[in-house]
Image: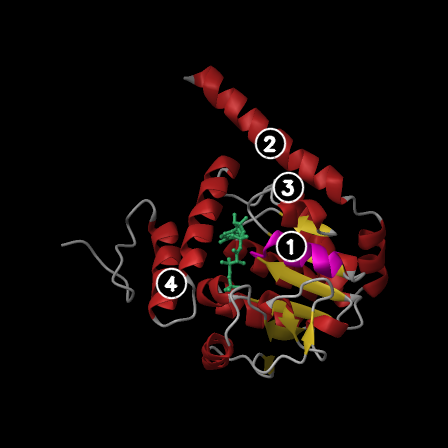
Amino acid sequence: MCPEDESGLDPTHPRYVSLNRRKRLAEGFRTGIVVPEGLIAHGRGEMFDYLLGEVTLPPALIAEKASAAALLTAKKPVISVNGNTAALCPEGIIDLAKAASAKIEVNLFHWSNNRALLIKKHLTANGAKDVIAENPDAVLEGIHHDRGKCHIAGIYSADVVLIPLEDGDRAQALVDMGKTVISIDLNPLSRTSLCASISIVDELNRALPNISRFARELSKNKSEAMKILDGYDNFKGLRSVYHTIHTRFYDLARSQ
Ligand code: PTJ
């Protein structure tokens, strides 16, 4: 008999971490937090994580530090949370909101008031306070569809928005509204990664604790945070990710 953890998974399985994430997502799907499309999005993310070697690359770490700096120096920082993000890493969202004094807004691509409430409940059960979720009272400029729904007290009036696992159209709308947009997206070719102000090409569960750690470090030195932001070059980071994938495949091809 193999040992099992409380989730019923075998911790000695070589893909235990990945199986655990799938389990959280599948549970989220069963409880109505995650939409079916979210399962597809996760598969796409896993595929890109394979290409990256399932590690936080140096350019991702730089982007995570710059993101911490942007959140800390913001007037109104907001973390946007969708179904996948809530199911995968509620602890990470809540801890980052604390570390960066950011608001949490449930903001959905496949909007429903009921799902927003379910996600709010899930976050609250995990220790979140003051989650903005139901009854949106604003729309993202240029998005005349349910997926534009948001809150004046949250994303609509925010100056810096963190958007994990976000759709490109909505990401672009936030950029067009003049906000500093931080994406977490394993696909370095997605419209979201290409249009964000700071593109973190890393897995959500690795990225969030890194940003929190940097936020705690930088909170003691805001002028250092400003300096980091001033010197940050997003396209340099994306080029470095493309280069890493290329080199990784080149080396693998030569070694076989
Ligand atoms: O809950 P909703 O209604 O707001 O819908 C959420 C989804 C994810 C379905 C919606 O935002 C969507 O359709 O997103 P996309 O356009 O599929 O983009 C999601 C991006 O996140 C893709 O580029 C994936 O590669 C990436 N991704 C998936 N899982 C992870 C990830 N990036 C980082 N970490 C992950 N775990």
Q: Coloring scheme of the render?
A: secondary structure
Residue under the image location 80 percent in, 72 percent down: 75
Look at label 1 and name its amino acid: Asp
- Tags 4 and 2 touching, CB below 8 Å: no
- Say whether disc 4 or disc 2 marks the residue closer to the N-terminus: 4
Q: Is residue 158 left or right of residue 206?
A: right
**How far is the residue under mark 3 from the one under mark 2?**
10 Å
Foreground label between 1 and 3:
1
- Say whether disc 2 or disc 1 marks the residue closer to the N-terminus: 1
Q: Secondary structure at mark 2?
A: helix
Is 130 situated above or below 24?
Answer: below
Foreground label between 3 and 2:
2
Residue under the image location 38 percent in, 52 percent down: 17
Magenta range is 165-175
Foreground label between 2 and 1:
1
- Tags 4 and 1 touching, CB below 8 Å: no
**How far is the residue under mark 4 from the one under mark 1?**
27 Å
Look at label 3 and name its amino acid: Pro
Q: Which residue is mark 1?
A: 169
**How far is the residue under mark 4 from the one under mark 2?**
30 Å
Residue that lies at the very extreme toward the left in this rendered image: 1
Q: Which residue is mark 4?
A: 24
- Say whether disc 1 or disc 3 marks the residue closer to the N-terminus: 3
Q: Which residue is mark 3?
A: 58
**How far is the residue under mark 2 from the one under mark 1?**
27 Å
